[in-house]
Amino acid sequence: MTLYPFTFQAMAATNEVQVHAATPEAARFAAALAIEEVRRIEAKYSRYRPESVVSRINAAAGFDPVAIDAETAQLLAYANSCYEMSGGLFDATSGVLRRAWDFKKPRVPTERELGPLRARIGWARVERAENTLRLPEAGMEIDFGGFGKEYAVDRAVAVLLEHGIEAAMVNLAGDLAITGPQPGGAPWRVGVQHPRRAGTVVATVDVSSGALATSGDYERYVEVEGVRHCHVLDPRTGHSVRGFQSVTAIGPTCLVAGTATTIAMLKGAGGGQEWLAGLGLPHLCVLEDGAVVDRTGGRPGGAC
Amino acid sequence: MAATEGGEKEAQSDKNGATLATLMRAALALPVLALPVRAQAAEVGEIGFALLGYKERGLMKISEPLMWGKAQIGDNWTVSASALVDIVTGASPELVSNLSGSPMRTVTGASISDRRTAGDLKVTRRFGPLTLGASRAVSNEEDYRSRAFGLDATYELEGKLTTFAAGYGKSNDRVGSADNPDLDERRDTKEYLLGITQVLSPTALVQSSLQWSRGKGYYNDPYKRTLTFYPDAELPILYDDTRPSGRDTLAWLTRFRHHDPGRGTLQADYRYYHDDWGISAHTLEVAYQWDFAEAWSVRPALRYYTQSAADFYGQVVPRPPPETLSSDQRLAAFGGVSPSVRLTWRLDTITVEGTAGYYYNAANLRPGGGTEGFVPLRAYYGLVTIVKSF
């Protein structure tokens, strides 16, 4: 058994798959299927592609319901659980705020711009049926940005394990899943990106098994009068969240780890840490002042 | 009051346990798998076996079968143990005399064969960021016996980028001699360590530690003597190896590691050493581990060493004889180079390593020159290690 690494481009980033296989052929075969799966999900849920499910749903906002397949329905059911569990903070319709926020220009949208957009947010108003979805109002949008990549990590792992791979690591631009310790039993030492210094790590986390996801305020943001406005937006105000530079969590699936960190960011420093502690998942936070809170040690958490 | 707080916490945890369960149910409706969450080191254990061969031209040969095992028990306990047998054959007693006009070493004909058995046991317990360890080591040979005890602690700062280490060790030794059954002397040493490891970047780290020790007791080598002929005297002066009855040492070690993913790892180490016998030493080692195939790596290394002589080092017994004198070459001023190469092969949970190395010590390898009359030392060694982890 040998570890075979592969890198590939998808979702506007460089990604990595490492598989533990008996032969290079078996490794290449399984890795190719996993990479294809990631690209399938990207094409299906990208809002930049006019033929994607997401583009079709958004284009039909205010008109007829759009037919959706089982996978899309289940993903939206997952988004619904996140909406309910987060008290409405995690809202798959909040992407509409991007019309006011241009993170390429150092400017904060005015209340006049944000007000009408906030009115178009509202997951509770989305009409979900078993195999259709309808956005009730023209101008409403749904967005899989908060969970599409995480789902792709989970699917890539499932594809690898279904195709005879014993152990694997999938890393889509920092959201990753690890199915077991390294050959020899050592855990994978995962470096957590420093939220303020590119190319350096703020902490390392040992992971033998599980999915690790990070949300941060450093990927897209603008700084106006010394205040950082990041791309994680509160659907209630339309403004950027405060309290964390980044949040990393380890969960049984990347989907759960990723939405756990996003909801923590949305809840802010106090509520976010309580939320993570309550979930029982190992986590690591970098607070607004740069302080690191490492809760990855101790007992393996999680109810699963 | 406390009970109320506890109750509230419990209620909150219950509620959020339900939160995770709800999210997991929704996630697992999708065609994905749940992975067990383990943010700590896996429960690992290993057993290993090593064999060392050493050949110092005409002087000594050691083979050292060594076995060790290590097991993690639960999340927080680790137990490790090792046992070794050294077999030393060849001539060791030596005499330095100036019989031929200049000082030279004579290896006496009396060949010795000795066997050393040693073992150690170490237990560590992790308390979150703090790890505490306690160890016990014993070593027995015909003319030397050692009992050592150690305590150490490491502490990781939040984020595990910085780790502090501290250690204390105590060793109680007994020195004897195969030639002199009456010799039974003590040597007691206390050792201290302070260290820091800092992760510099995703691929680089630096480690620095300061180690010092205080020793008291018998340091003489009962097998070494110095013999000096004076033209005006009929009988030569024969002087037993006599060293100070204490030794305080200080060592500062700094290591740097830079990993180049998919290619290899650069290692650079520097060590400074000083003791109150007057020896100052510098060691510089550079190595590159090249991962040239999935299961293979090769690690060429080059070490350079240089030391000054001990204050009481001499090849000739002066008149009148001093209080302390040793002609042991290891206390002379010299320099040395040691190239080595290590080949590693990994197959699943088995790792096999083979190392071959060479030592060359000589006076002219010390900048400015070493002790005149230093007999160059050439030695070869080979080491084979097999480790199975589970």
Image (cartoon, coloured by chain):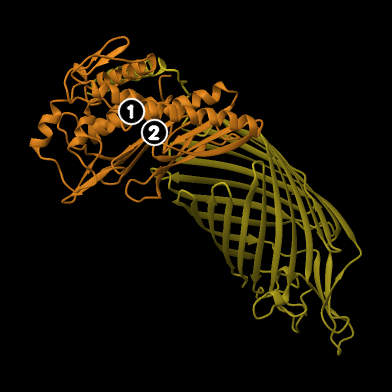
Chain colours: A orange, B yellow
Mark 2 burial class by Cα count in 10 Å: few <14, some 14-19, many 20+: many
Circles 1 and 2 on the same chain: yes
The answer to whether A28 appears left or right of A169 in the picture is right
User: Eyeballing the image, is A181 above or below B323?
Assistant: above
Query: Any mark on residue B165, and which?
Result: none
Is disc 1 placed on a helix, strand or loop?
Answer: helix
Q: Residue at x 80, y 53 (%)?
A: B62
In this view, which residue lies farthest toward the bottom? B232
Report in which chain the residue with disc 1 lies: A
- Can residue B390 be seen here? The reply is no
- Name the residue type under label 1: Ala
In this view, which residue lies farthest toward the top? A130
Q: Residue at x 16, y 33 (%)?
A: A238
> Residue B8 placed where, x, y %?
25, 20
Residue B224 figure quarter: bottom right
Query: Any mark on residue A260, and which?
Result: 1
